[in-house]
Amino acid sequence: MTKFLFFIALLLVLLYQPVVSQTFGKVNWQEFNSLEKLQKSQSKKVLVDVYTDWCGWCKKMDASTFSHPVITELLDKYFYSVKLNAEKADTILYAGKKFYLPGPGRTTHTLAALLLNGKMSYPSTVFLDESLKSLGPVPGYLEPAMMEKILVYFGENHYKTTDWKVFEKNFKGKIIVQEHGY
């Protein structure tokens, strides 16, 4: 009987989890090929999440950072958000050029290589300005509190007037960092 009750409780917890993740924060991911059209209707900066299917930290970032309600609010307010699988064979039009996966097997999409300046690291987050010019890549897993700082830095144009170190030191965000770091 105890095992049965434990199983039911576990099942309820597992079933409840998807409801929670759908209720709080959901990123409105766009297609890369639609960015130019979107920019014509409303000009925004762009966040590009460069990932691979096999990357565990990419999955963790999806589950924790990109599902955080503060992050989804900032993304919706300041950015178009795009996912770019660095190993997928999609042809993408960007800056008047075609980008593609150069061959079979584990190769890197030519757009991912361009956006990451050839320094392939997953996950990486790339920021583009409203004219789709790169503001630079940020490699590695980003916890929600760090992502909040970066989104505000670029989203509110602090990068144009304030050094990152000065901004980071003075930033007071909504996300409270716990003792364990996230």
Image: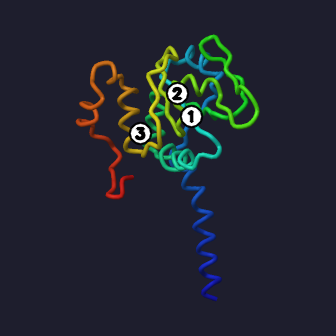
Provide the residue designation for mark 1. Answer: 50
Q: Is residue 76 above or below residue 63?
A: above
Q: Give the colour scheme of this rendering.
A: rainbow
- Name the mark on residue 147: 3
* Amino acid type of the residue that numbered disc 2 sits on in the rendered structure: Leu
* Relative image position of residue 86 (x, y in whole percent): 63, 33
Q: CA distance from mark 1 to mark 2?
A: 9 Å
Q: Is residue 168 left or right of residue 26?
A: left
State which mark lies toward you, 1 or 2: 2
User: Which amino acid does the dot numbered 1 rest on?
Assistant: Val
Mark 1 element type: strand
Q: Quadrant of residue 136?
A: top left
Residue carrying label 2: 116
Q: Earlier in the sequence, mark 2 or mark 3?
A: 2
Asked if marks 1 and 2 touch (Cβ < 8 Å), the reply is yes
Locate residue 38: give its quadrant: top right
Q: Tell which tag, 3 or 1, sits nearer the viewer.
A: 1
* Residue 117, position as x, y percentages in the image: 51, 24
Counting residues from the start of the chain, the first of labels 3 and 1 encountered is 1
Label 3, label 1: how far apart the Cα atoms are: 15 Å
Q: Is residue 69 left or right of residue 1?
A: left
In front: mark 2 or mark 3?
Answer: 2
> Is residue 162 rendered to the left or right of residue 63?
left
Dot 2: element? loop
> Which residue: 39% across, 26% down?
154
